[in-house]
Amino acid sequence: MLGIAIIPTFSTYVNAASIGTTTINQNTKVSLSVQEKLDKYVTVNNNQYVLSKESKSIVSEQEYAAAQQLIKQTNEAIKKTDSVINRETKVATNEFTLSDDKVKVISLNQGKATKRKKYHYGVNKVTYHWNYIRVYLNKNMTQTIASGALGGLGSLIASYVSGGAATFAVGAITAAVTTFVGNSIKGGVWVDYNFLAKTVTRTGWQ
């Protein structure tokens, strides 16, 4: 990826927020290092993320419960948006194609390594991982957000998160985009927002 920025985590808490149709406790925060440990215990079955019970031995009860609850909400969002999970990357997108046997799903969100321009106008979309969303913003929306307006960001992520959690996510994403692009908006950007760590972890140019 071009122009990738690693964003330091920060701590801000709110009492409770709605993700999908379920209320989760926003005070339960799971560090990125713990999520890395959990990642190998997350598999894909019937186009849904599944967290193995074996992971209970490496994390606390609260961390396990928080991960399970978030996976439940991610699975609901995947159904709601008719997305498909790539078994290899564990990334879900609603941009995909089917092979001739109509069984094997090939995700198109990864793309192929080809010679390309350094910056692109980009697209507006959201892809899912079990513990974070990647929000793609085209150049126009990036400019709008950097100027201080929300620019439809809340609507873009509404299929995944709502309520106080959405307000927090929009604020974090807006701040990250503004910092990343500075005074030079070269094209569209993408942003990784991690709901368990409650922070933006990476940004990059599309």
Image (tube, rainbow, N blue to C red):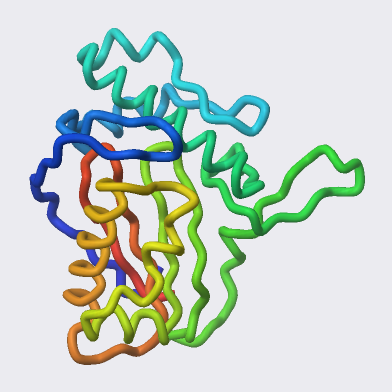
Quarter of the figure that contains the N terminus: bottom left
Residue 126 drawn at (x, y percent): 48, 59
Quarter holding residue 21: top left
Nearest the eye: 82 or 42: 82
Instruction: Please state the total of marks drawn on the protein image.
Output: 0
- Which sits in the foreground, 9 or 165? 165
Residue at the image position 34 percent from the left and 56 percent from the top:
192
Residue 53 percent coordinates (x, y): 41, 10
> What residue lies at 56% left-to-right and 46% top-to-bottom?
92
Q: Residue furthest right?
A: 100
Residue 111 vs residue 133: left or right?
right
Image spot of residue 180 (x, y percent): 22, 75
Q: Is residue 178 above or below residue 103?
A: below
Query: Residue 178 is drawn in which quadrant?
Result: bottom left
Left or right: 97, with 178 as reference point: right
> Is 186 above or below relative to 3?
below
| Identity of the residue drawn at 31% across and 10% down | 56
Q: In the drawing, does residue 17 fall left or right of residue 79? A: left
- What residue appears at the point 24 percent right and 66 percent down from the top-left corner? 5
